[in-house]
Amino acid sequence: MGDVEKIVIIGSGPAGWTAAIYAARAMLDPVLLEGVPKQNGGYVLPGGQLMLTTEVENYPGYPEGIDGPKMMADFKKQAQRFDTRIEARDVVRCDFSTRPFTLETRNGSGDEKTVTAHAVIIASGATANWIGLDNERRLATSGGGVSACAVCDGALPVFRDQVLVVVGGGDTAMEEASYLTKFASKVYIVHRRDSLRASKVMQDRVLKNPKAQVIWNSVVTDVLGDEMISGVRLKDVETGLERDFECKGLFLAIGHTPATAFLEGSGIELDDKKYLKLTAAQRMNTSIEGVFAAGDVADSTYRQAVTAAGMGCQAALDAERWLAEQGK
Ligand code: NAP
């Protein structure tokens, strides 16, 4: 076991890198555990959800838009400029029951290392759920018209005045469908049952919108198209019949999974959907004093790069103050 670190940041999306920039500039000498590089169906991690995004148009400061992976590389460079120490390790287990905190980590070769820290910022993110079709993943990473975030991608020119499909029946699907009706010629919501999960008010907004229509009792069984999506194959779950349905965009809104599995048994409080619970208004504190959270791992509502970065900044400032109070 090495020396006790002042602060360790877990995660390498906008929240993690921003926390590192602030912590490093505050002379806290942070270590950022960015995760082991993984190639998963065309996705290259670490770097978070932005590694799956082609063009980011809504992050202020990039008037022409920027590629998601390029943006994450720039965030990393900025954190390195202030001497953040970066390690390509996954955290597999945490013990927050005693201080300093203990993090069991593993590198790409499976070598384990225990890292100890006075303060921890968890910024491990959440991943969008996908149906799991080959073409879905391929077209999502190549800018082929498949996305898991309408707010991020829906305004791109490629979707203007086109027929678009949203999959899901929850609040996110309703919100995304409503948003997309501003640009699309028509938005079809494909839902696997005959009633929506979304709240009544969100349902009503969509069901009353003449540009939106629900296709009930249906699932997407294939995504059609080579470079760009040309349609989806829909299966009626009641009759089993399949048909090809033309569309120029596919938006998945079938939930997110927060990256909190490594926190099981650590004693930290999660909510019923396994997101980290923030325990103080306007603060990034978790249920464990000295452990802070930032970004999508603690935010199932906004899930934007800019909000995650803001939370990263807040978490670093909260941690800095807390460490000072502890005389560390
Ligand atoms: P969600 O409530 O879990 O809904 C996911 C939807 O996707 C469900 O309709 C589900 O179908 C469907 N689904 C799941 N897996 C599927 C699959 N493999 N194939 C096809 N469909 C699948 O997730 P969410 O809509 O992202 O909402 C998450 C939380 O955020 C909720 O608590 C929600 O209220 C909240 N939220 C609130 C707002 C707001 O108030 N403005 C906006 C967005 C989200 P079933 O219904 O059949 O299970």
Image (cartoon, helix red, strand yellow):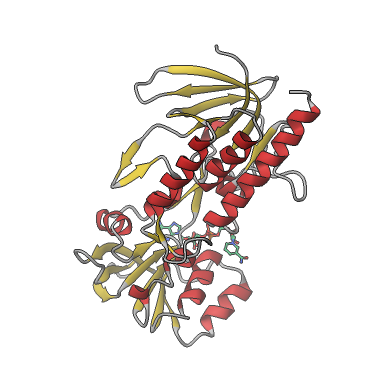
Q: Quadrant of residue 227?
A: bottom left
Where is 194 relative to 6, above or below?
A: below
- Residue most toward the right? 325
Please state the horizontal and vertical placement of residue 281, each as a whole percent of the image.
77, 50
- Residue most toward the left? 226
Please state the horizontal and vertical placement of residue 258, each as a whole percent of the image.
53, 45
Please state the horizontal and vertical placement of residue 88, each as a whole percent of the image.
42, 29
Residue 240 visible? The answer is yes
- Residue most toward the front? 81
Q: Quadrant of residue 115?
A: top right
Residue at the spot 51% in from the left edge and 60% down from the top edge: 61
Which sits in the foreground, 53 or 243?
A: 53
Count how many numbered circles sit on residues in the image.
Answer: 0
Residue at the spot 42% in from the left edge and 63% down from the top edge: 65
Residue at the spot 31% in from the left edge and 61% down from the top edge: 143
Please state the horizontal and vertical placement of residue 92, each as a whole percent of the image.
49, 27
Where is 305 relative to 144, above or below?
A: above
- Residue most toward the bottom? 210
Quarter of the image with the C terminus in it: top right
| In this picture, residue 227 sits left or right of residue 120 | left
Which sits in the foreground, 184 or 238?
A: 184
Which sits in the foreground, 323 or 197?
A: 323
| In this picture, residue 279 sits left or right of residue 84 | right
Which sits in the foreground, 96 or 323?
A: 323
Quarter of the image with the N terminus in it: top right
Residue 241 visible? The answer is no
